[in-house]
Image: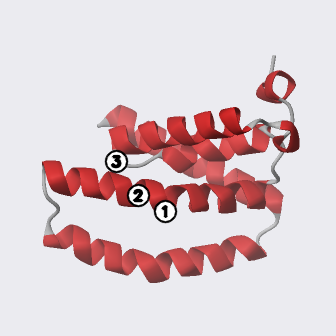
Amino acid sequence: MNFVKRWGTMARTTRKRQTLLGLMTGLINGAFGGGGGMFAVPMLIDMGKEQHDAQATAMALILPMTVATAVAYVWRAGITWQAIWAALGSIPGAWLGARWMGRMRSVWLSRLFAAFALLAGIRMLLL
């Protein structure tokens, strides 16, 4: 049974289920230092969101999650200057990526998302 049949569309999804999605996304992001969006996007699509909307919603989920994760890592282990420079570089990259995403057809956006998820998984399995 697929997720949509069990949980219904996004419009009918309860706040409890939406909060559970956020909790699971945060747990994954916090535990692995990233990847929450890879979990959130397919779940949002299964809940009735279109590909573009699911990815944009995942980005909105990631901002507070990333801040919380970064604070936890700084408190526990510290962050290097190299990470700060990478973070500064990510700002224009994220803006450009969001503009690019908005111009792509949903089918290609979905395929690229799946390809990056697959490549990331293969890379992690080989390390």
Q: Position of residue 90 (x, y in %)?
A: 41, 75
Q: Earlier in the sequence, mark 1 or mark 3?
A: 3
Q: Position of residue 89 (x, y in %)?
A: 36, 79
Q: Which mark is residue 33?
A: 3
Give me the C-alpha separation between circle 3 and circle 2: 9 Å
Q: Is residue 104 left or right of residue 11?
A: left
Q: Are marks 2 and 1 in contact (CB under 8 Å)?
A: yes
* Of the two numbered discs 3 and 2 in the rendering, the one whose residue sits closer to the viewer: 2
Image quadrant assignment for residue 28: top left
Q: Nearer the viewer, residue 100 or 22?
A: 22
Q: Is residue 14 left or right of residue 21?
A: right
Label 3 crowding class (10 Å Cα cut-off): few <14, some 14-19, many 20+? Answer: some
Give me the C-alpha separation between circle 1 and circle 3: 13 Å
Instruction: Pick out the residue farthest to the top.
Output: 1
- The amino acid marked with disc number 3 is Gly
Q: Which mark is residue 63?
A: 1
Q: Are marks 3 and 2 in contact (CB under 8 Å)?
A: no
Q: Nearer the viewer, residue 60 or 106?
A: 60
Q: Earlier in the sequence, mark 3 or mark 2?
A: 3
Q: Position of residue 113 (x, y in %)?
A: 63, 53
Q: The C terminus is located in which quarter?
A: top left
* Of the two numbered discs 1 and 3 in the rendering, the one whose residue sits closer to the viewer: 1
The local secondary structure at tag 3 comes to loop
Name the residue carrying label 2: 66
Q: Are marks 1 and 3 in contact (CB under 8 Å)?
A: no
Label 2 crowding class (10 Å Cα cut-off): few <14, some 14-19, many 20+? Answer: some
